[in-house]
Image: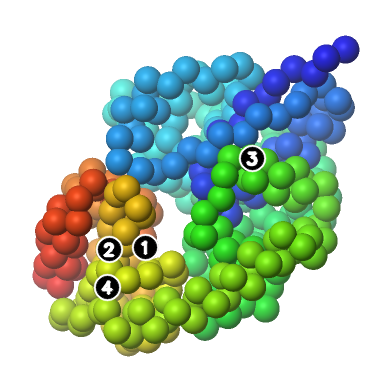
Amino acid sequence: MSKQSFNIYLNDDFDGISSAAVFLYFINKKWPGKYKFKYSLAVFKPGYRESWIRKKLSKPSAVFDFRYHPDADWWFDHHGTSFIFEAQKKSFKSTKQKVWDEDSKSCCGLVLKHLAKSFNFEFPGYLKKLARQADIIDAAGYKSARHALMPEEDAIKFSNFLPLGFTSGEAGVWVEKLSSEPMAKVVSIGSVRSRIKKAEKVIVESIENARNNSRILGKTILLFGGKVFSRFAVYYVYPKVPYAVIVSDKSGYYHIGAGKNPWLKIKNQKDLSKIMKEFGGGGHLNVGATEVKTKKEALQIAQKVVEILNK
Ligand SMILES: [Mn+2]
């Protein structure tokens, strides 16, 4: 009997990959040998809304850590800005196969808890651990900027090399590995080990870059240009400044990220998700982003976001 294709759409970060890994374990236990999986990265880049709306998802399909899609048979997300249309948000009700929870620290944690509860399903310890680590990574629950940049934990080391870039095919290989064995085993694979080494080198350079290419404007660090790589490098260099706005060149488009220093307590904290939504983006309370085509637009938006944060 030939296997049926199951289409997995995942956000291109640690949360997307770990969510899919937990889901894959579940599907393979429920329907052993029934499916082969096809992976596609769902990426927040200019024009993604239009192409996501137009996209037809082939069945069966599952979407992780990305905007709602009415075709999806399974959908899990925790972004406050998940629904492209207000009407979708209004009519949405969580089911066994679709769930949205803004309060979940990670999508991976949401997938694991929701499937365990809805299907009375028991996950192995290494996947429960993966979900706890996704909660830390996706909600920036690191103990310090140093912990984020120079971690001891394998999962954080793994997540730190993902911004180097990867293909849908590579994501699929990692999803399948992580669904069947602990992170400690996955990071011992040669190709994964060499990426971790590479990322460690780039992180050192990105700390240098944060030192050389940023300016302090009131309560905000503005970092523009250079090798950005990690959004935490600015807080490593300036631990006392509450907010940061970071412009990075994604080759082909520009990313404007705005964040709150996760290790500082701030009175009357601004909602970064709301601020970035005004510029066509989205995010969470403590971190938001948007994407534009030109450097000029990116710098204009960055300047405006700095002004809003300093108000
Ligand atoms: Mn997420």
Query: What is the distance, in whole Å, between disc 2 and disc 3 at their CAs?
Result: 28 Å
- Residue topped by disc 1: 286
Label 1 is placed on what type of residue?
A: Asn
Say which quarter of the image contains residue 269.
Answer: bottom left
* Disc nearest the viewer among 1 and 2: 2
Q: Percent from the top left, x then y, of residue 249?
A: 32, 59
Numbered disc in front, either 1 or 4: 4
Q: Which residue is mark 4?
A: 223
Say which of marks 2 and 3 sits in front.
Answer: 3
User: Which residue type carries mark 3?
Assistant: Gly
Name the residue: 30% across, 41% down: 46
Could you give the CA–CA distance between mark 1 and mark 2, rounded to whole angstroms?
17 Å
Any part of residue 299 in sight: yes
Write the residue at 23% across / 46% down.
293
Alpha carbon distance from label 1 to label 4: 17 Å
Farthest-out residue, top? 1
